[in-house]
Image: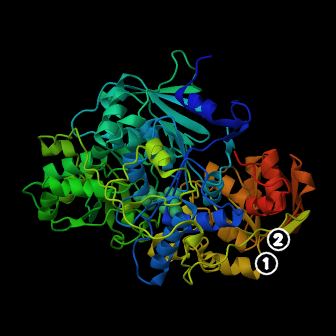
Amino acid sequence: MSLTLAEKIIQAHLISGKMQIGEKIGLRIDQTLIQDATGTMAWLQFEALGVSRVKNELAVSYIDHNTLQCGFENADDHQFLQDMAAKYGAYFSRLGNGICHQVHLERFGQPGKTLLGSDSHTPTGGGLGMLAMGAGGLDVALAMAGEPFYLNMPKVMGVKLTGSLSPWVTAMDVILALLGRLTVKGGVDCVMEYFGEGVKKLSVPHRATITNMGAELGATGSVFPSDEITQEFLQAQGRSDVWRELSADEGCNYSQVIELNLSELEPMIARPHSPDNVCPVKNVAGTKVDQVLIGSCTNSSYELLSAVAQIVKGRTVHPLVSLSIAPGSRQVLNMLAQNNELDHLISTGARILESACGPCIGMGQSPSSAGNSLRTFNRNFPGRSGTKDANVYLVSPLVAIASALTGMITDPRDLGQPPVLPKVERFLINDNMVIPPQHEKCHSRSDVERESGFNSLQNRSPITAFGDDVQVRRGPNIQPLPLGQPLPEKLTGKVLIKVGDNISTDHILPAGAEVLPLRSNIPAISRYVFAQVDKEFSKRAQKWGGGFIVGGVNYGQGSSREHAALAPMYLGIRAVITKSFARIHQANLVNFGILPLCFADPQDYDKLSQGDDLELTWDNGASGLKLLVKNKQLEIKLTPQLSARDKELVEAGGTLAWVKGAAAGLIII
Ligand code: MIC
Ligand code: SF4
């Protein structure tokens, strides 16, 4: 039978279930990544599993999100993360080395492998022909313990690319055009698979921009074939030994095929406040710009920043614009420095930021009140920038820099001569900011290195202890992990809040400089649940002794942060009732023992209001659950969004509670 590339990778990793759309499948996970903002919880959960060392092929723990150190919290967390990586045998990418997705693409990714990351933009790895997926920290901790990753067998949507990009048009315009067409729900339950002649015209960094923002389509993953372009990229990274050719079979079946002619694309822009609010740049050209930010895991490759440096050479940023640039990794920054391009960026007036997520997650650089901020990032949900009334636009680095020079949104084609995007023969390879696992009993180090093509013998940093010899430093910010309670037969409580469609995890639990440092402290972070939407939510939840959340379509889109489920669990929420859920958030709710329920008839959404008194009899999770709205004397039918396995997990009070209680123990593969 002819298979798509995604199906081939799934088949090669299938542990349980059938490859039938919607069926629960269990996949063997080769590589994992965690970052600091989700990693503290992931490590605490890994520890709670009682496993002595990391068991998957390659695990990397990155520091890239919580980089502002305005108090002891983040620095404490960094020490904890480093010690846990040493103790359990993970690679540790130190602060300053770069954004997890960019570094992983450069130094660790491998065609044909599965990668699970506790960050929603993990699908970036699909640019190298990986099946790379985002998940909650607990799912990644389980994968690090050698457990399968469970998901519903996705549909595979084919995206046929023809033609080639015109000057001044980049991969960002490709994915923005797709978002405009498909919306933030368009990829839900799908892997987006790219094929066609146009693919050959896109470099790996370009491909990675597209797979990165597949997350904004709601897709489970996005994948490009692994071809000679992939081979050249890996060769330039000194990792040609991990290359293998991969593509879909001739005549394979996609659930749907979309065609996109790259030659017809023009510079695009996503307007406030959603990545799918897209139009051509020329439609909004002339709009005043206050701030321009270039960076993030989406658009900060050497290729793109070198082009930006060419454009600004000899020019000065507009006097009314604040321009900041964060190279995606230290490799990119080093190369810009080596090739004198950093000089042009500095001379033009750019503020050079460290290689980290930074402003993308509200860690500094918040715009002015009601300011217009142009960003090369992937999300512009309200409030994410740190300024509630700011207008955030998403654009390619070429649109961003053209606008920074003119002070208004500018179609870069107006600048005339386009830059040349460099083809790199050899990247600057220096892995001295990655500490490899020292655990001798872990897979022999050389095996891991050979497997990953990781060149850690160069400039290896010394560390002194591993395994049980590591004294894990736990500052006061590392609070114990709360565990869920078994599901009672009857759930009662009030509707604590009713929200609309496309509520993101940024709405449910904001990030930013004030809240992010509390990621390892659930009691403290739970005070911020829905803080952007309703400041009183957390107090109300405590006063009313927990209750229910009601939402619309695509509830929980965006990030993988499991804190958006964990903190509500801590506040006593046992069920969320919506029209539909985003994949990762739904799985996170199950992991923490919260029932994800959908209205059997979406119109019943209109019948519920904040403060309604609800009663739900669990009735063994019968498919047609009845919700009693006591104060309105109404009955509403609900459908639990649970597989047989999920049901067991929720009934036990969540996955950790289940694992701890499961007599059978872990299914180590
Ligand atoms: C994001 O872009 O929203 C984040 C911050 O990277 C999150 C992870 C987190 O909240 O820690 C994500 O995308 O999953
Ligand atoms: Fe970091 Fe932004 Fe990428 Fe999330 S989207 S990983 S915050 S750079």
> Would you say 599 lies left or right of 185 here?
right
Locate residue 83, reporting x and y percent: 52, 70
Q: Mark on residue 36? A: none
**Closer to the observer: label 1 or label 2?**
1
Q: Amino acid at mark 1?
A: Gly
Q: Quadrant of residue 613?
A: bottom right
Q: Counting other residues with Cα less than 10 Å from the Cα at mark 2, is it few (<14), some (14-19), or many (20 or more)?
A: many
> Position of 414 compared to 132: left or right?
left
Quarter that holds the C terminus: top right
- x and y percent of residue 619 in the render? 93, 54
Where's residue 53, x and y in %? 61, 59
Q: Quadrant of ligand 2?
A: bottom left
Q: Is residue 596 above or below residue 644?
A: below
Q: How many neighbours does mark 1 have within 10 angstroms: few (below 14), some (14-19), or many (20 or more)?
A: some
Mark 1 or 2 closer to N-term? 2
Picture quadrant of residue 26 = top right
Question: Which kind of residue does numbered mark 2 sit on?
Answer: Gly
Residue receiving disc 1: 545
- The image's colour scheme reads rainbow
* Secondary structure category for the residue under label 1: loop
Q: Is residue 203 above or below residue 212?
A: above
